[in-house]
Image (cartoon, grey):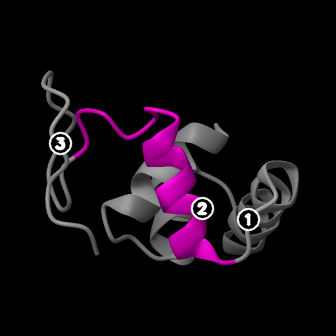
Amino acid sequence: MDIMIIRLLHQGLGDAAIGRRLGIGHRTVQRRVQRVMDRWGVVGRVALGARAQELGLLGGVRAGGPLVTDNRLGNSA
């Protein structure tokens, strides 16, 4: 679920919108994001997105759009 949260963040969704989409509370989203940032040793959500991109976890994600099959990144939010 953490990867899905990161992908939805990359698409520009806020914590509340992510929570609604995944059926969890916005505080749960915030805690999970913080846990991943701690685990990956990054400070801030921009750094989290950059690290996720480095790890190839955002391949096929386009801002504001659905998952696609290519590895290009869309516009970042």
From which residue to which does the magenta span run? Answer: 44-61
Magenta stretch encompasses residue 50: yes
| Extreme residue toward the front, this view | 54
For residue 55, the mark is none
- The residues tagged by marks 2 and 3 sit, at their Cα atoms, a distance apart of 21 Å
63 or 40, nearer to the observer? 40
Give the vertical position of 72 relative to 47 (above or below).
above
Amino acid type, label 1: Val
Residue that numbered label 2 is attached to = 48
- The residues tagged by marks 2 and 1 sit, at their Cα atoms, a distance apart of 6 Å
Give whichever of discs 2 and 3 has the lower sequence position.
2
Q: Secondary structure at mark 1?
A: loop
Q: Is residue 31 left or right of residue 14?
A: right
Q: Residue at x 20, y 60 (%)?
A: 63
Give the position of the C terminus as an image quadrant: bottom left
Residue that numbered label 1 is attached to = 42
Amino acid type, label 3: Pro
Q: Residue at x 48, y 42 (%)?
A: 54
**Viewer-nearest of labels 2 and 3?**
2
4 or 51, nearer to the observer? 51
Residue that numbered label 3 is attached to = 66
Give whichever of discs 3 and 1 has the lower sequence position.
1
Amino acid type, label 2: Leu
**Residue 47: image location, x then y, percent:** 58, 68
Q: Residue at x 20, y 30 (%)?
A: 71
69 or 14, nearer to the observer? 69
**Residue 13: image location, x then y, percent:** 38, 70
**Residue 28: image location, x then y, percent:** 77, 63
- Crowd tier of the residue under label 2, counting other residues whose Cα lies within 10 Å: few below 14, some 14–19, many 20 or above: many
**Res 27 → quadrant:** bottom right
Give the vertical position of 62 relative to 37 (above or below).
above
